[in-house]
Image (cartoon, grey):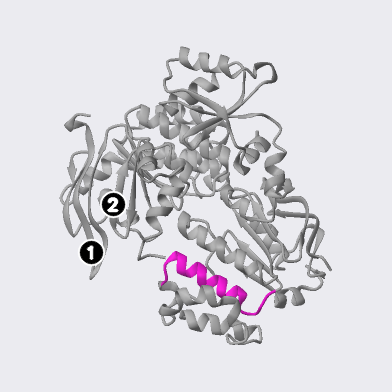
Amino acid sequence: MMEAVVVKNLVKTYGKEKTVAVDDVSFSVDKGELFGLIGPDGAGKTSIFRMLTTLLLPDSGSATVDGHDIVKDFRQIRSSVGYMPGKFSLYQDLTIEENLHFFATVFGTTIEENYHLIKDIYVQIEPFKNRRAGKLSGGMKQKLALCCALIHKPTTLFLDEPTTGVDPVSRKEFWEMLRRLKEENITILVSTPYMDEASLCDRIALVQGGKILSIDTPHGIVNSYPDALLAIKANEMYRLLKALKGYPGILNSYAFGEYAHATLRDAHTDTHALQVYLHEHGLTGVEVKEAEVTIEDSFIKLLH
Amino acid sequence: MMQDDKVIVCEKLTKRFGDFVATNEITFDVHKGEIFGFLGANGAGKTTAMRMLCGLSAPSSGKATIAGYDVYTQTEQIKRNIGYMSQKFSLYENLTVLENIEFFGGIYGLSDERIKSKTEELLQRLGLKSEANKLVGSLPLGWKQKLSFSVAVLHEPKIVFLDEPTGGVDPVTRRQFWDMIYEAAHDGITVFVTTHYMDEAEYCNRISIMVDGKMEVLDTPANLKNSFHARSMDEVFYQLARGAKRGD
């Protein structure tokens, strides 16, 4: 069996007003793949994860995890997958060691049996093993939660926004841990609002408003960007953005780090005319060049 | 810039919790209308420093004035002259848009008349007129964040403190949010902002990076990239914060 997760036309609504959280979503994840759901808060990422981990029933549609149906076979799924919710959900008044021991026992295993899976991560929090989970820093909680989700050697790991609110250095370290786990042949589904993390996945789904906008490899998504993207710099970003918005040939423009990114209408591909326009609007230090398309540009294009 | 242009003046500001020095002798100034980026890894001491600057926590030692008021003795005046918003709490979810604006306007001591005109202007600018009587909790996150920023500057404070204002917001809304920040700064409001998005660091006039309680660097994004031979702020941050000993 090549596919670890298969999702077909999954729908989830909430409340009397039937607010749609997940809107006819379909995708599949191969065994051993590192698959990312990329999108902002409210995109439906958590609802998808909670249905796949059997914690929430879909309104319609179906899905399987390791060939088990998420409604009928919920027991098998619960014993074989690992889940790290976005909100810290371990026992705050148990210590690091007690939490880990508890989760190992509940899943009928021991810390020793699968220690090799968590070793790299656990050694970083081991000096504090007698500290209560509620007293740990954000980064340490995150590492403990990952250890607890891994201790029964899950076939598939669901990580819901593991890096939200985490600084860029800790985020990089976390993704290095995931790459190492992938080598253990664990299928990993991870969600994140950080577009720059998308490039670290094998494949990604861009999600917004309960819908999947696009699914492909990060490379594939970037390569299918339809327009020529320009990177434009000037001494004053605020005035540059304002001037670009007023340019007749502009299709879309927005800030992107030290540059503004912009796409031009077909009839206005002459960048020289744009340079002249910006000079006329009093901007100095103007530089216009071709931009390297990123996942974030693709996402903005899909929202536009 | 002129001396009297400084709205935040900090000299060796320090906060200790027992033996632990959360914020260690930070010294810096922020000018009127500046967008000042306050970066650092988790646990570097940012929140503690911000709490002192907002008059919420008394320093252990050092000096600081915010909008000309002393952080030891004039904390009430400080609170009246600043705005604050964070990703976690800013507005009451079970009040409507209108009720939130009225509530915060009242808290900041604006007259009913002023609240009325400000409300009108704000709803117009945000395009939220038809949503005025909806509960804030029912709005999408992006709208909530734009609304809470507008509420944080409702009383035209001298400084607005923004604590990770764009976390989890989609890339288009994130940029609309920054348009609002630019506009506020253009109107003379000083913006003090923390973020984990390094592209946003580029939008600040100056950036400081805290490491282990100390302010390790403070300069424009361009100068920082030059002095660290880095192509992006992400690289600068990584080089500095990688050496951090404490925190996560």
The residue under label 2 is B215
Q: Is residue B86 visible?
A: no
Left or right of A182 on screen, residue A261: left
- Please check the rendered image and state whether residue B39 is part of the magenta-colored stretch, yes or no: no
Mark 1 secondary-structure assignment: strand
User: x and y percent of residue B162 in the render?
Assistant: 39, 44
What is the quadrant of residue A273 in the picture?
Answer: top right
Residue type marked 1:
Arg
The residue under label 1 is B16
Residue type marked 2:
Met
What is the quadrant of residue B187 in the picture?
Answer: top left
Q: Residues within 10 Å of mark 1 (few under 14, many from 20)?
A: some
**Could you tell which of marks 1 and 2 lies nearer the N-terminus?**
1
Q: Is residue A230 visible?
A: yes
As rendered, which of B62 and B137 lies closer to the eye? B62
Left or right of B118 on screen, residue B131: right
Please, which chain is the residue tagged with disc 1 on? Answer: B
Span highlighted in magenta in the image = A136-154
